[in-house]
Amino acid sequence: LKARTSYDEDGVLRRIKAGFARRAGSRFVALGMGDDAALLRPTAGYETVLTCDWFLEGTHFLRDRHPADSVGWKCLARALSDVAAMGGMPRCFLLSLALPRELAGRWLDDFLGGLARAAKRFECPLAGGDTTERSEVLINITAIGETRRGAALTRNGARPGNLIYVTGRLGEAEMGLRLLREGKKISAMDVRLKKHLYPEPRLKVGKWLAEKGLATAMMDLSDGMSLDLKRLCDASGVGAFVHGNKLPVALGGKRDTKGEALNAALHGGDDYELLFTVAGKSNDKIPASGDGVKITRIGEIVHDSGVQLVDARGHSTPLQGLGWDPFREA
Amino acid sequence: LKARTSYDEDGVLRRIKAGFARRAGSRFVALGMGDDAALLRPTAGYETVLTCDWFLEGTHFLRDRHPADSVGWKCLARALSDVAAMGGMPRCFLLSLALPRELAGRWLDDFLGGLARAAKRFECPLAGGDTTERSEVLINITAIGETRRGAALTRNGARPGNLIYVTGRLGEAEMGLRLLREGKKISAMDVRLKKHLYPEPRLKVGKWLAEKGLATAMMDLSDGMSLDLKRLCDASGVGAFVHGNKLPVALGGKRDTKGEALNAALHGGDDYELLFTVAGKSNDKIPASGDGVKITRIGEIVHDSGVQLVDARGHSTPLQGLGWDPFREA
């Protein structure tokens, strides 16, 4: 990491290095923090997966509502969800961090704690980055992964007759955000809150699908299923039917109505689940769960463009891609 | 690129794609913009060079003083300077861009114009990124390059007796910034202004030094020579003597005094020149210029720690690493 300004830049860098020193080793990272750039050793026969992701105070998280530990965990987890969406395995990441001076102590330590736990959990060491001072917390994560050459799953391979699947439960993270905003005392063990604060990229399921060659298209759900499925369909030049009563909705609290849970599952953001399509004949090769995560068939790909929502009585209506942004309504 | 919010995100993405479509092809980029992540094909026998760089309105550039075209050029050029500093060749880059809604028209087009020219000039296509809306312009560039395995030049190899060299002229960019701030009418051809707005990473010289195995240590000068040389010395566990009268100072205007030019050369930021060390016996293998850029010997590495400035009469005084930040004094 290179210092760009000199508030207590050296102190910030020392904290970052201290937080990651024990986990720095990796066969993939030939040169880590401290030089002009990092050096990686690619694996023969693999392609490099590369993605970057903003995580900005006020846009993607709220400093007064989101614990620093969660900010650290989530900024890496969501970047790795894009690696999972290609069927890739994480190799390392870069951290670009801009920070107010007054957060360079306790807040930074908590942030680095969450980030280091995620890095360990997902076997993805910190290889470098850039830091500067700023009045708001700005984070950008570059995640680097690998897939076997030719095995990566893209968005454009869905074909009419393909079946549509998702991992996990949809809408929980949005419900978790609502709980957080209401500011009531809630258990840290609440599944909705946990899903919002500490998402788990579906790396093992994504890798399995890519290596088995079972999925025809895949992406991760980050902006809401209705919008993301539309993107997958547009990239593939197809349409889709989604069955509302098959959607794996949130395990909600008592007061969540069925309609609220369905709405969150259709349009809620921050799911970080996988959405993928499979040829009809491969249906029985898709297990009911993988790596402890439920896998659910929710619909099928059709010729006509557009996404239709089918209700319990078999009536279909166009599903609007609502493009959920957690802070637009705030 | 993935849309994270929906102001006119699709319009922004369309403009980005349009600006780069003709230059998208590359043997290195197997999958570019439009999916969850980019896919790169590493070259056999090479290592991957990876670096990321903030370029933030108010911290690294001023919206009312820096032309959008220069912002586009410079954000990529400075990231590629870190690739040059390892002796690497650029392969592709990722653009993370946060933008106020009102800049999504003309300003964005000018920005993309400068960025696309730099991408073409340095043979470094855009492979992906992330965009969002924000009240200020935030840019983060991830630059990806390659070096032959084992050939990369790091900061920690300088040894006592090594000679110290720099490329180009130092301090011009800082003088260019001063001109820009004063807001007077100045020619766009002024070398100082040009160096500040449109720096050229020393990619060919860096690659040549790495492939010939001539340099023992290398880094790029971005935060001021006095601070950056201290970093190289600290990483190598050595000290240095720098000869003030050998420094290649700016080709300044009439009113710049010799003292001002020397001061800018010692402490001015944004040079994006290379600083490197060479074993004494290799001195005659270093040419007086490379790729049209002057190469100047400015001092030597010694056992003692710390950097000393030697004046014309042979007197030496400790050189403070002033850690120049272009906007701190503003």
Image (cartoon, coloured by chain):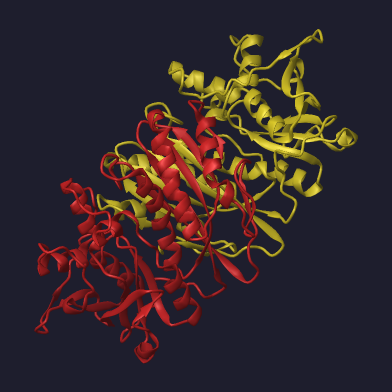
Chain colours: A red, B yellow
The quarter of the picture where residue A262 lies is bottom left
The quarter of the picture where residue B316 lies is top right
- Viewport quadrant of the C terminus of chain A: top left
In the image, residue A290 sits, relative to residue B22, either above or below, namely below
Who is closer to the viewer here, A51 or A294? A294
* Left or right: residue B289 compared with residue A287: right
> Can see residue B75?
no
Instruction: Please give the name of the residue rendered at 35% of the width and 82% of the height, measured from the top-left corner.
Output: A159
Who is closer to the viewer here, A186 or B115? A186
> Can see residue A169?
yes
Who is closer to the viewer here, A275 or A73? A73
Rendering coords of residue B75 (x, y %): 49, 40
Rendering coords of residue A161 (x, y %): 31, 87
Instruction: Please give the name of the residue rendered at 36% of the width and 90% of the height, measured from the top-left corner.
Output: A284
In the image, residue B259 sits, relative to residue A288, either above or below, namely above
Who is closer to the viewer here, A224 or A91? A91
Total numbered labels placed on residues in the image: 0
- Viewport quadrant of the N terminus of chain A: top right
In the image, residue B266 sits, relative to residue A113, either above or below, namely above
Rendering coords of residue A179 (x, y %): 19, 53
* Left or right: residue B252 compared with residue A231: right
Rendering coords of residue A16 (x, y %): 52, 41
Instruction: Please give the name of the residue rendered at 48% of the width and 82% of the height, measured from the top-left corner.
Output: A212
The quarter of the picture where residue B282 lies is top right
